[in-house]
Amino acid sequence: MDFEIIGIGSALVDITVHVSESFLEAEGLPKGGMTLIDAGRAREFLNKLPADERELSPGGTTANVMAAFAHCGGKPAFVGKVGRDWLGEYFKRETERTGVAFVELRSEKTPTGSAFTFITPDGERTFATYLGAAAELSPADLPPDLFRRAPLLHIEAYLVVNRELMDYLLITGKANGQKISMDLSSFGVVRENLDYFEKISRTYLSIIFANEDESLAFTGLAPRDSLDVFSRLCEITVVKEGANGSYLARRNHKVYLPAKKVWVEDTNGAGDAYAGAVLYGLSRGMSISACGRLGTQAGALIVSQKGARVTEDRARILRDFACAMDTLMIRRLEAGSLTPEMVAAAGREVADFHAAAERCPNGDTILESLRSHIRKNFTQMEACVGITLSGEQQQAIRDYVNTFLRTYERFFESRAREGRLIACHGDLHMEHIALGDRITILECLEFERSFPYSDAAMDVAFLAMDLDYHGRSDLATAFLDAYAERSGDDLIYDMVPFYKVLRACQRAALISVRLENPHLSEDERKSVIATARKYFSLAESYTRTKKNPAR
């Protein structure tokens, strides 16, 4: 294929200006929203706004998303319609300069569209858009082979004003095997077309991006809670909440990423940059948390400067960061280049990470919290029996866990005394360790974490279990040995098999929940069942492991 992603949307030139709250009120513009205007009102704005206070840049939501995808190192294309005027030439030149291929469509009579971005003192953006030539984009304009030139298609909800075009893009993209991504664009657009968006989300969309206002308009729920609604409709959901971070879900697997703390200069384009970076990560097979981390970096680079696209210096920073994400341990393993030395270095890094972590202030409560967590896992496992888990496996796992808790209660007391109960990572597997010039542990917050502190061995067990699952128990041993030596943790070999059982069961139960999705194809259903069964079988195999004697 020629490209990694194709974006289709409104080709606009952004005209950015800082205004007061009273300006928005006087012009009747709802703060934070988007208002469509005609050519006459666009001229009025230009007459009111001093030329030396206006900043021009190539814009349009989808075009900005494609620019961020390119800045990460990807190969995107953008399709949009411009006029035969100087603004059209400006848009073409600046789009291609960022590394985005512009599939050029021209209107013979209508001028290039423009998007006014009014920024109030608090950094909030309000839009007034004259679509111009962009509104003339039609199915007849699109090359017949366009949808076969990339595996991903990204479109913007703003296109709903041209329902014929939107339907054509969705139907044709799906017919050509593309995964379709959509940014919900504006709470007003969502509210006015809610039934339509619900229908296409269920039928055509694989990926949905929304901010907190758009997710509220769609679901009536807060960002975190809205993921449950979106996850029933499409495979991947991203809900951005500005300075409060972002929520991502791949079906039932959900993560939260805090925003980076930076000085906010201008929020214009931050959501677009975030989406472009996330799409780049998805195109590289990254986990949703790694994608979210990449998106967070892109958004932070945007808000700490002026303009909706990063400067050349910041583009290099973003590309370097994206390259680090490309060195994830799982990718090294898949390429056959993950060595015992790399894994041992990761073991030492994890030990240092744990040494610096916050200690649990009341370790005597941890065991009861763990028991509560285990009861929840056992309840989840009940629903899996006969589908992804056999009755014999379930009984073996229950017996092992309960016996360990009864027999080795003193181990947990010792863990508390030694300061091994800490604010763990919580989701330490191969998709969260980057092996670049230096080892980086990628942090995120899992929704399913039942308590803020846990045994450091639980982190170690998760990564070791992940290596076991992928057939590299030799590397799991190298990791564990390096961690034990660096940390001086005398009980680590005793605790890890127990926590491996819990982690493998938790993973299996979480994957099994996907079977509740009525839209799974038969092949997808078989794949989910096979994966969950493999995790449960791995968990049961650990129950037969001979535990090292306590030291």
Image (cartoon, rainbow, N blue to C red):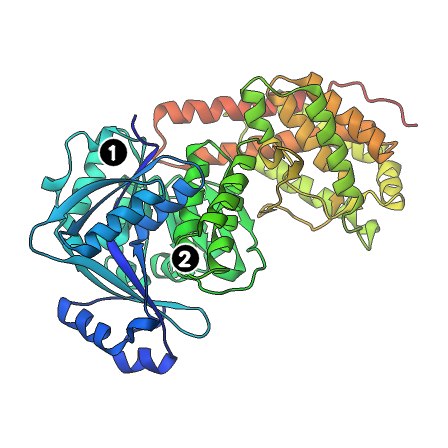
Give residue 277's quadrant in the image.
Answer: top left
Q: Which residue is mark 2?
A: 211
Q: Residue at x 19, y 69 (%)?
A: 42
Percent across and percent down for residue 22 are 35, 83
The N terminus lies in quadrant? top left
Q: Which element is circle 2 on?
A: strand
Q: Residue at x 82, y 30 (%)?
A: 484
Kind of residue indicated by mark 1: Lys
- Residue 236 seen in the current view: no
Dot 2 alpha-carbon crowd within 10 angstroms: few under 14, some 14 to 19, many 20 or more: many
Q: Is residue 485 above or below residue 273?
A: above
Give the alpha-carbon distance from disc 1 to disc 2, as whole Å: 25 Å
Image position, residue 174 (x, y; %): 25, 33
Precedes in sequence: disc 1 or disc 2? 1
* Residue 79: x %, y % from top left: 23, 42
On screen, residue 354 versus residue 43, left or right, reads right
Visible residue check, residue 204: yes
Q: Position of residue 12 (x, y in %)?
A: 24, 55
Q: What's the amino acid at mark 2? A: Asn
Q: Secondary structure at mark 1?
A: helix
Name above or below for residue 417 compared with residue 35.
Answer: above
